[in-house]
Image (cartoon, grey):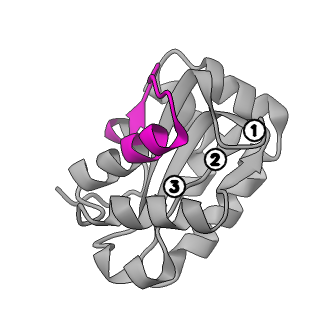
Amino acid sequence: MLTDSILNKANIVLNAQAKTKEEAIRLAGEVLVKQGYVAPSYIDAMLEREELTTTYIGNHVAIPHGTEAAKSLVKQSGISIVQIPDGVDFGNGNIAAIVIGIAGKDGEHLDILSKLALVCAEADNVEAMANAKTEEDILALLDEVNG
């Protein structure tokens, strides 16, 4: 089920529950698999990447993604957004309320990351995503990432 956008309504999970960062990363990865962006084993690469260094970027946001070696598992660039209202600890007391899974094809992940970082650098944007009641609310905030 390939799509021409890297983010659409089906890529967003609202009100998710995750007790651990591993659960949160799996949720984000499962959306990428289900939407056809990556092979199932990409999730393992996301977990492996997290073991190397945290993907928590601040402002209650984590951006898990696969390792360099997992590039071949990416079928198409895409992102998943998992909203976790209760937050999940990504280590050292860093609580993520928004977990954004990324799969970038042909080096596109850097472009996607930089666009996401700009949006997530604004605490108001993150708060709006964390409190969003509909997928459309999140899509509106991340419109420029899709462009």
In depth, the one of 143 and 14 nearer the eye is 14
Name the amino acid, label 2.
Ala
Q: Between disc 2 and disc 3, whose residue precedes?
A: 2
- Give the residue pinned by disc 2: 62
Query: Is residue 15 highlighted in magenta?
Result: yes
**Can you say which quadrant of the picture contains the N terminus?**
bottom left
Q: Between disc 1 and disc 2, whose residue precedes?
A: 2
Where 82 falls versus 6 (above or below)?
Answer: above
Q: Residue at x 52, y 35 (%)?
A: 20
User: Which of labels 1 and 3 is toward the front?
Assistant: 1
**Label placed on residue 51:** none
Q: Are marks 1 and 2 in contact (CB under 8 Å)?
A: yes
Local secondary structure at mark 1 = loop
Q: From the top left corner, tell me how far across and down residue 41 is, in percent.
A: 27, 65
User: Which of labels 1 and 2 is toward the front?
Assistant: 1
Q: Residues within 10 Å of mark 3 (few under 14, many from 20)?
A: some
**Label placed on residue 146:** 3
Measured Cα–Cα span from mark 1 to mark 3: 27 Å
Name the amino acid, label 3.
Asn
In depth, the one of 6 and 42 nearer the eye is 42
Local secondary structure at mark 3 = helix
**Label placed on residue 94:** 1
Local secondary structure at mark 2 = strand
What's the magenta region?
Answer: 10-27
